[in-house]
Image (tube, helix red, strand yellow):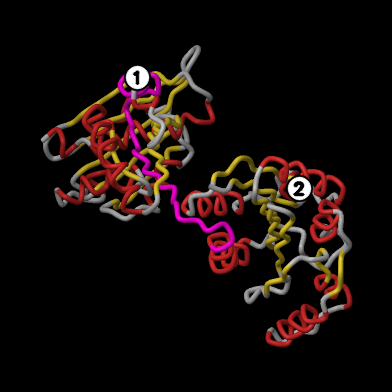
Amino acid sequence: MPSAEIITIGTELLLGEIVDTNARFIARKLRDAGIDLYRTTTVGDNLNRIAEIIQQSMQRCDIVITTGGLGPTVDDPTRAAVAQALGVESEYHPELWQQIQSRFKRLGREPTDNNRRQAFIPQGAKAYENPVGTAPIFISEYMSKVVIALPGVPSEMEYLMTHTILPYLQSHFNMLSVIKTRILHTVGVGESQIDDCIGDLEQLTNPTVGLAAHSGQVDVRITVKADSDRTAEQLIEPVEATLRARLGEWIYGTDQETLEEVSLRSLSQKNWTFTVLEAGLGGYMVRRLANAKGPFLAGQVLVTAKDADKLHELTDNFRQLHHADAGLGVAILPTEDSLKVLSVLITPNETKQFERLYGGPPEYASFWAFNQCLDLIRRINHDH
């Protein structure tokens, strides 16, 4: 099974001016194709440093994928850096220049002289047309290694990775295996408690089981390598069944399911409408619920939590104002050495009130409170 590393190129990435989404997309595509990812690296627009990192990656893995630095400007050094890393010259391809000119013509524009730089690629490399952008991409095969240069524009990179690079890799490496992942989302339980329940499963080799803790919830990841999707699913199923048996109602969803979707689904199943009143969360809960599909009618954000002692009354008044069946109120209050989360859930059947201390980083308090409160709603159908 081949191995790979990803190098994202751009000083704007290195300085945190933009978020790198390319590495995440490529990593998932490689995972699904059965390719082991060893490392991801970000480097600025410096020719020598890019070349050095490419050489280091080639010593560790079979496939090196770069994104960015294929534009026409002086600070787009990827083509020259790959050539330097491989010890070859850059060479001009007139057919690439024709492709670039044709692309600009279809866009109703004229290329400038510096666009001609994009027709230079490392000697011996194979160029591939970019039907969704102006920069051609190329693949350099060096001994048993492969260096792939993709554009940094996410939409271009995603198209080329899917339609050009993956078919090439599957053919070149004669790949017959897949890597499949199943993620079980849990809430209302800590990482150490889950580890205590499933520690023996975390020792498995194929599938593997791992944990990823977030503020207020923990993901349990099952990963398997197999020769087909069907075989992978057959290997995952018994492990998932064991995890579900041990973790029970702590599991709220799978893969792309979100806690707000699952919780609002519980209300929809009862045909209940729903309002939220929050204080001290900065509007976090209202924003999250407003973007989810479900019976969420309205939310109100209090400027301060000074009226938290009236949380039940305020929540019920807001619920009645909008003629909702259920209402949630939540407030975060400071204490001497931590934060306190107050919550009240009013439904046609009952009223529940909770008070919990939160001792984690203050910037994560809203996320933690959101998870705790949505877990209350999620469990409505379990409790009745």
How far from the left and from the top, in percent, is residue 119? 81, 73
Identity of the residue furthest to the top in this view: 336
- Could you say which quadrant of the image residue 343 lies in? top left
- Could you say which quadrant of the image residue 15 lies in? top right
Query: With 176 as the anchor, is 124 left or right in this view?
Result: right
The answer to if 189 sits in the magenta stretch is: yes
Q: Residue at x 20, y 51 (%)?
A: 268
Circle 2 is placed at which residue position?
54
CA neighbours of label 2 inside 10 A, class few (<14), some (14 to 19), many (20+)? many
First in sequence: mark 2 or mark 1?
2
Please, what secondary structure does the residue beneath circle 1 have?
Answer: helix
Numbered tag placed on residue 193 in the rendering: 1
Q: Residue at x 29, y 35 (%)?
A: 239
Check contact, mark 2 vs mark 1: CB within 8 A: no
Q: Amino acid at mark 2?
A: Ile
Query: With 358 as the anchor, is 17 left or right in this view?
Result: right
Q: Residue at x 75, y 50 (%)?
A: 12
Q: Residue at x 78, y 81 (%)?
A: 95
Highlighted magenta segment, given as a residue range: 171-198
Decide which of 9, 290 is in the foreground and name it: 9
Decide which of 304, 276 is in the foreground and name it: 276
Compute the Cα span from label 2 to label 1: 42 Å
How far from the left and from the top, in percent, is residue 264? 27, 47
The image shows residue 41, relative to residue 25, as above or below, that is: above
Q: Amino acid at mark 1?
A: Gln
How far from the left and from the top, in percent, is residue 261? 31, 48
- Which image quadrant: the C terminus? top left
